[in-house]
Image: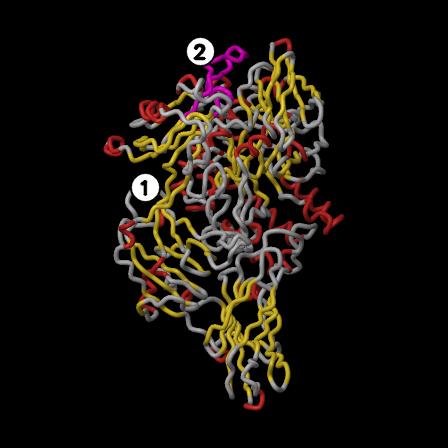
Amino acid sequence: MRVVVYHKVACLVAALISIGLLVNTAMATEEVVASGCSYDGRSLVINGKRELVFSGSIHYTRSQPDMWPDLLKKSREGGLNAISTYVFWNVHEPEPGKFDFSGQNDLAQFIKLAQKNGMFVILRVGPFIQAEWNHGGLPYWLREVPDMTFRTNNEPFKRHMEKFVSKVVDEMNKDKLFASQGGPIILFQIENEYNNVAATFKEEGTKYIHWAANMALNLSTGVPVIMCKQNDAPGAVIPTCNGRNCGDTYVPVHSAKPILWTENWTAQYRVFGDPPSQRSAEDLAFSVARFFARSGTMINYYMYHGGTNYGRTGAAFVTTRYYDEAPLDEYGLYKEPKWGHLKDLHHTLRLCRKGLLWGKSSVHSIGKDFEVRVYEKPDENICVAFLANANPKVDGSINFRGTSYYLPRHSISILPDCKTVVYNTQKVNAQHNARTFIVAKQTQQGNEWMMNQEPVPRYRETAVKAMEPLELFNMTKDRTDYLWYSTSFKIEDDDLPIRHDIRPVLQVSNLGHVMHAFVNGQYIGTGRGTKIEKSFVFQKPMELKTGLNHISLLNMMVGLPDSGAYMERRMAGVHTASIQGLNTGTLDLTTIGWGHQVGLAGEFFKIYEEEGISKVRWAPAVKNMPVTWYRRYFDAPEGTDPVALDLSSMGKGFMYVNGKPLGRYWVSYLSPLGKPSQSVYHMPRSFLKPKNNYLVIFEEHTGNPKDILIMTVKRDNICTFVSEQNPALSKSWSRKDGQLKTKGDDLSPAATLTCPDKKIINKVVFASFGNPLGMCGNFTAGSCHTPKAISLVEKLCVGKKSCTLPATGKDYDADAKCPGTASTLAVQAKCVKNKDKENN
């Protein structure tokens, strides 16, 4: 048993709904009510009792306010009782002393909505947050404060950090959002993963961390303070774990502090050039079960909904789409089976609540890779067991208290009464679904594009001149991605190569991130760095002429850095330039004088807004034109399904609709698999009007706008794949009078199918019981197939929003016909709009 010492700091927090309701599958939504909170060595203590916390990260800045209610509702339905969010300093204080907590930045409103949905809030203030967010959340202007060094014992940084953190606390206090005031905020995070830079700053870093901890504790929020990945968290601050497998990797060092997991990565964020990232529902569930089996009592999924890096908010090279593989995808749609499998897990762990929080723990190793963890409270007849098979390849069985239990590879079975397997992490009862993108036909009508080519500036036309190329970040100050470098030089006829097979070569050493080169107004090529190595060397042959020649380099960043020590010292842009292959040898251009133009002319005239259309000349669009603005009008797709842009026909650039920045796109940067990291981009419904939407694309090097597609996004293809060996549906079980109870007599395996809101099942595309093959959207019958399956599924499901299907051979006359098969039910169904529901 761990030593239990109650934390002296007590606070009032939002009350969870009653224990009885917590075990229900459909958790009631009640606005939280003020009560008490503290922590001990086992868990957070809420309403005077220890509590399990299931949290998910949703960032208010990465979704639109009209999406918040639906995201929070779905999170609650998924079994969460808390929401976690970072606080984004650079959106709230874009200029020193000028604060913005409105619209999409209305943090207080987001927290109030979480409270209305009956959920707590974990407020991760930082204010350094990393989060794959531009500059790690730090405003650019901090770099220009004299004597500034980020995240160490530096007085200017500490002064500004304390001012902002205090401002956030004041904003929360205005609406009484801390639990000590009856609000939902139960935890307050200061700093973020400081262990990653601690070795660089040494003693000064230690002083800073102690200062930050004391500063946070002295703000009188009335809630416990946490630091993630900070095992030496000072004083009353709780250290927490971040990672994929904290149940295996985290070693607690404070017996008086609970074991909390602030980031369980539901997949992995992607950068441009990456292949797709995946994490299975089974692996994610295994990690959570493992953590709770090993004394963990709070989990936070990072992310539960990733969302979109709108505008220029993504960090260096990070894709515009963020954590699309989360339980709620980029568009806020259920990602199945991940969402449903975790929902079942949360329900099962709640059935184990008393044992996990008050029981005495014991561990039993049963050979290699097998382990049994038990939590018992004999005086109340409480017993909970976790049976684990950690072998990633081999199934097995173990004998526990006289009964043999089959354990698939890499799985944990949860027995809330030490007898009954209610859940196995490898056995998925939740439905599956497949996402489809449907071209909105009405948007293809009048697909007429106009274009305006961005002027390529020459040296004499630039406003800022210097002998050498100037550093990009310092010039742009995070107000634009773009900086033009221009220079001019004279070439004599004798300088040019005599041989026809030799051409001059432009060589540019560049500190990052991307550069498009123009010689005498002609585009000659593009160079780029990578997330890992930002700098690169550009080398391309070119045509020069006798007399004056002009070189113009459009350099750009793809987001500011978001991690590491000395971020304020990072640089980008042209470093050196030269011409090779001349008769007179290499011509060094680095110190001959350079002109600089910050931003694009189209940005200056705001031609991405309708009011700016008349400020430039437009012509019918021609494809594959470098540095070109394209525009068109379109009507919004019918219905309420999310909207997306397919930019597969484009290269790299920026997107706007109705003057709102959608973000960066980069389709020409292919992953090692030969495909772009992202070709489809979210266009929020809230940005659109019913008619005449103004779409603007700035293409940097090559693309065909006429092939851009406007699509709607659906997850209407729903499936199930359930074996006769699966446990019964987790909702079949509940707790009553402290004991595990069934909600019916039939505990046979079953499958459920549920359509999205306002939709019903209108067609069964596939149904088979036996040994079907494939996956959702691509099922095929195996060597054993029962014809009765499709007729039975149609009878039970067609015309309904939801249906439950038996998953045993006797129901499909398969017992005698399919001996030795996997005895699995596979079904794919199609959901359509329920017209009766729509008309009501």
Q: Indicate yes or no whether the magenta region holds residue 725.
A: yes
In this picture, is 482 found above or below 319?
A: below
**Pointer 1 residue:** 640
Q: Is residue 563 above or below residue 38?
A: below
Residue at 62% of width from left, 19% of height from top? 385
Where residue 86 sits: x, y (%)?
54, 42
Residue at point 45%, 41% (across, down): 329
Residue 745: mark = 2
Q: Counting residues from the N terminus, which is met first, the one under dot 1 or under dot 2?
A: 1
Numbered range of the magenta stretch: 723-752
For the C terminus, the quadrant is top left
Q: Residue at x 58, y 70 (%)?
A: 470
Quarter of the rendering containing residue 167: top right
Q: From what the image shows, is residue 766 above or below residue 329?
A: above
Label 1 CA crowd tier, 10 Å (few <14, some 14–19, many 20+): few
Instruction: Please rate how many residues cluster around mark 2, counting C-alpha atoms within 10 Å: few if below 14, some from 14 to 19, many from 20.
Output: few
Foreground pick, 596 / 287: 287
Report the residue that reaches farthest toward the right: 203
* Disc 1 secondary structure class: loop
